[in-house]
Amino acid sequence: MKYGLIFWGNPPRGTELLKIQRTVIRIATGYRSKDPLRDLFKNLKFLHFQSQYILSLILFVVNRTY
């Protein structure tokens, strides 16, 4: 999912992609739809779509300046 993320930008369907990401995580781990996912994302060491985008931008800028 990380490949080319900074070139997509923040797509108009980004919220839809986040919902799909959450659904896949819930199905894979057996969480119910009403269970909060914040701790699960931390335990699995996953980043939300928006966090991945921000991290990719930061790494791109840092790698280009040195």
Image (cartoon, grey):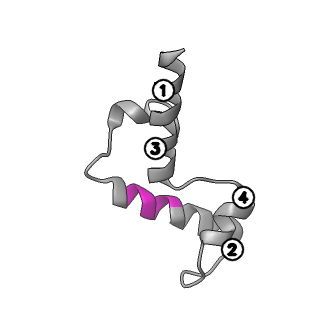
Secondary element at image label 2:
loop
Per the rendered image, the range of residues in magenta is: 16-21
- Type of residue at label 3? Ile
Q: Are the residues flagged by discs 3 and 4 in contact, CB closer than 8 Å?
A: no
Mark toward the viewer: 4 or 1:
1
Q: Residue at x 54, y 80 (%)?
A: 33
Residue behind mark 2: 30
- Type of residue at label 1? Phe
In this rendered view, identify the residue nearer to me: 25 or 7. Answer: 7
Secondary element at image label 1:
helix
Of labels 2 and 3, earlier in sequence is 2
CA–CA distance in space, label 2 to label 3: 28 Å
Residue behind mark 1: 60
Quarter holding the C terminus is top right
Residue behind mark 4: 44
Callout 2 environment at 10 Å: few (<14), some (14 to 19), or many (20+)? few
CA–CA distance in space, label 3 to label 4: 19 Å
Mark toward the viewer: 3 or 4:
3
Residue behind mark 3: 54
- Type of residue at label 4? Leu
